[in-house]
Image (cartoon, helix red, strand yellow):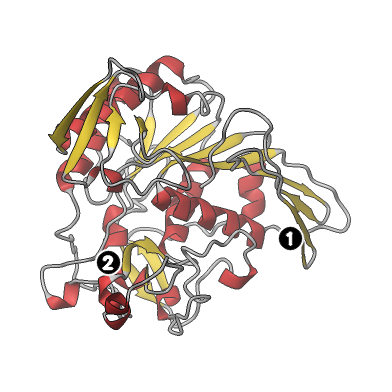
Amino acid sequence: MKLGKWDIRIKSHYFAGLVVMVLFTAALFLTGRNNDVVLVEEIARNVDRKTGPSCNDSVFRCNLFSGKWVFDGVSNTLYEEKKCSFMTNEFACEKYGRKEFKYQKWRWQPHQCDLPRFNGSSFMEKIRGKRVVFVGDSLIRNQWISMLCMIESSLHPSSSKAVEYNATIEFYWSPLLVESNCDDPYSHRIKDRTVRIKSIEKHARHWTDADILIFNSFMWWLEPNMTILWGSFGSSDAIYKRVETNLRLYEMALNTWSEWLEININRTKTKLFFMSLSPYHFQGESLNEGHCYNVTEPIMKEDYWGISTDIDMMRTAESTIQKLEKRGLKAEYLNITHLSDYRRDAHTSIYRKFGDLSDDQLSNPKSYSDCVHWCLPGVPDVWNQIFYSYIINSS
């Protein structure tokens, strides 16, 4: 399809979500890979659980995670929703009726430096010839779409020089990281979640040759109960056990993930990132810190920490990554939780595509508001600016 000067071509294979980004003069090509299924849809040393790497971190001279939101009064967006050809209905708040855009005019300001401005050309040069994969649930998909929009807006076609980047930026749906009955990228709203807690190869074989891997896994572990499967789905001798979801299950899944990385990842080639949990805002310590519906201002309480943010799960993830580093494999833990926790104004709320809603729901918008995902442009752009800083400053 033609989008102004851009010629966007998408070719899919099965659930293909491989995105090949190549710039030839005035064309951005997106193509699928004709191989097995590619599904569409932080640990620096001495990590502080709220703000991540310290100012002594080897990559930065200051802590990008520690700061405050500053209102500029002008839009600080890196792209426009309606001009991004990759935008999806889940994150398109303006398309679905949001008329107030003050949430786009807040800038994340680290205490001791400025957040580097995203430069699409510099980023694409850095990943030239490389494969980047975002792995996880719909929140990492939120971040992936943000990244594609940022790149598309930042790259300007040149009339005098043809540049081929030959880089791929992909999203792979794997909300629990390990194998589960929720692995279909389109049909995964399953009430009774079943996981093979020690099995990851089904997914991980698609990541083996990646140059940069960005993972997340949190929200899908919040169900009160899950079924653990020993054996294979559909096997006559499989053993199923219904259990309460707890930290131990999450830890077991992350151990399976880290053990696979330790054995299979090329340590001289692949850079690893793990995103800390993205906070949700259905409740708070007071009416001024609660539900995201009809909210137009960030939480301005200094050093705010939402009561819905599971610190124990964060510590479990941090511990897993620290252990992995002690075994010789470094993963950067991007602790975006604290900075995002202030922004209950920036969720999609009622401004996204929903399925059929009942009359009762329509009469009470708060009942169906999405206080998990984020409007785009929005908070995930800041996550990507931080991720960009790591990539640009890496060797």
At 47% across and 44% down in the image, what residue appears? Answer: 185
**Secondary structure category for the residue under label 1:** loop
Q: Say above or below: 359 vs 196.
A: below
What's the CA distance linking mark 1 and mark 2?
Answer: 33 Å
Name the foreground residue: 3 vs 36.
Answer: 36
- Name the residue carrying label 1: 156
Q: Would residue 51 be visible to someone looking at this image? A: yes
Please identify the residue farthest to the front as the structure is shown. 236
| Amino acid beneath label 2 | Tyr
- Vertical comparison of 302 with 332: above or below: below
Within 10 Å of disc 1 (Cα), the crowding (few <14, some 14-19, many 20+) is some
Give me the residue at 17% from left, 47% from top.
Answer: 311
| 17 with respect to 305 (left or right) | right
In the depicted structure, whether residue 329 falls above or below residue 350: above
Callout 2 environment at 10 Å: few (<14), some (14 to 19), or many (20+)?
Answer: many
Left or right? Give the position of 347 relative to 265: left
Q: Quadrant of residue 323?
A: top left
From the top left corner, tell me how far across and down residue 36 is, in percent.
60, 28
* Residue 79 location, quadrant: bottom right
Q: Which residue is mark 2?
A: 342
Task: Relative to 200, say whether 97 is above or below.
Answer: below
Residue 78 x, y percent position in the rendering: 56, 66
Callout 2: SS: loop
Q: Position of residue 42 (x, y in %)?
A: 34, 40
* Mark 1 vs 2, N-terminal side: 1
- Give coordinates of residue 350: x percent, y percent: 37, 74
| Residue 322 at least partly seen | no
Which residue is painted at 62% across and 64% down in the image? 84
Q: Is residue 250 left or right of residue 38?
A: left
Looking at the picture, which amino acid does disc 1 mark? His
